[in-house]
Image (tube, grey):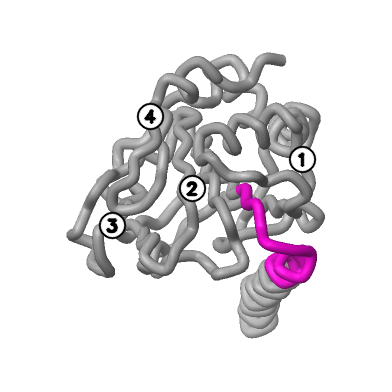
């Protein structure tokens, strides 16, 4: 299946302000988006989940395989003029957003490039739209990305790659793909998200069990 609009990706110039980034609307083609969403992991909790902690079908697996392909890596090497050969990768997936999510941050220093692909079929909310920021202020907007319809944003991580979004609560499907510096950074990312997923699952179901006992 032909997943990505590579022509649009290559025709979109790399922006260098406020840091190196590219935004491609509709990067995931409409037909592929439908198949991916049909097999998207069922995620009831907020937070980012490593692939090994969720279950998904073949439609979503096609996206995972495409992200890990040499074609994907080479396209980003060309766009950002950087050698990514031999760099480890990480993939995490989100299904739901809490009102406390979207706090301004730059991503951890072990990450090289962050790629975010948004998979909601549509988006009408003012919250939840990723903002690339000129400084550590949610109002210092350089670009805003609608988190839906296969839109992609990718940026070179730096000490000033500030980004965040206004509060939103509800379903917000996003896959995050990263090239990281080394295997140690890869392990740290996986362990951190795995621990976070376990804690959130425990808190969610622990509270539910306690409520049932009290009821």
Q: Residue at x 41, y 38 (%)?
A: 22
Q: CA distance from mark 1 to mark 4?
A: 34 Å
Residue beneath disc 1: 56
Dot in front, 3 or 1: 3
Q: Nearer the viewer, residue 206 or 174?
A: 174
Q: Secondary structure at mark 1?
A: loop
Residue name at image x 29 percent, y 53 percent: 18
Q: CA distance from mark 3 to mark 1?
A: 33 Å
Please tell me the numbered disc located at residue 126: none
- Precedes in sequence: disc 1 or disc 2: 1
Relative vertical location of residue 12 with respect to residue 120 in this rendering, above or below: above
Mark 4 vs mark 2, CA separation in Å: 31 Å
| Disc nearer the start of the sequence (3/1) | 1
Is residue 2 one of those drawn in magenta?
A: no
The residue identified by callout 3 is 133
Disc 1 and disc 2: Cα gap in Å? 17 Å
Q: Reading the chain from its start, which is encountered first: label 1 or label 4?
A: 4
Q: CA distance from mark 2 to mark 3?
A: 24 Å
* The N terminus, quarter of image: top right
The tally of labels here is 4
Please tell me which of labels 2 and 3 falls first in the chain.
3
Question: Do we see residue 205 in this rendering?
Answer: no
What segment is highlighted magenta in the picture? 177-190
Residue ID for mark 4:
13
Q: Alpha carbon of mark 3 to alpha carbon of mark 4: how far?
A: 19 Å
Q: Which residue is mark 2?
A: 171
Contact? badges 1 and 4 (CB < 8 Å): no
């Amino acid at each position: 299946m032909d997943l990505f609009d590579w022509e649009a990706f290559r025709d979109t110039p790399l922006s260098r302000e406020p840091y190196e980034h590219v935004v491609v609307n509709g990067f995931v083609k409409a037909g592929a988006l439908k198949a991916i969403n049909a097999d998207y992991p069922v995620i009831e909790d907020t937070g980012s989940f490593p692939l090994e902690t969720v279950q998904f079908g073949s439609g979503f697996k096609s996206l995972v395989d495409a992200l890990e392909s040499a074609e994907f890596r080479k396209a980003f090497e060309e766009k950002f003029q950087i050698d990514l050969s031999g760099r480890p990768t990480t993939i995490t997936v989100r299904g739901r957003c809490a009102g406390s999510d979207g706090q301004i941050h730059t991503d951890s220093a072990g990450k090289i490039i962050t790629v975010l692909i948004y998979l909601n079929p549509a988006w009408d909310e003012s919250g939840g739209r990723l903002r690339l920021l000129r400084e550590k202020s949610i109002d210092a907007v350089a670009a805003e990305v609608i988190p839906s319809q296969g839109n992609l944003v990718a940026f070179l991580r730096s000490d000033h790659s500030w980004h965040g979004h206004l509060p939103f609560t509800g379903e917000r499907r996003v896959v995050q793909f990263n090239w990281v510096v080394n295997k140690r950074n890869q392990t740290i990312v996986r362990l951190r998200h795995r621990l976070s997923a376990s804690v959130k699952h425990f808190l969610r179901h622990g509270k539910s069990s306690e409520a049932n006992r009290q009821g």
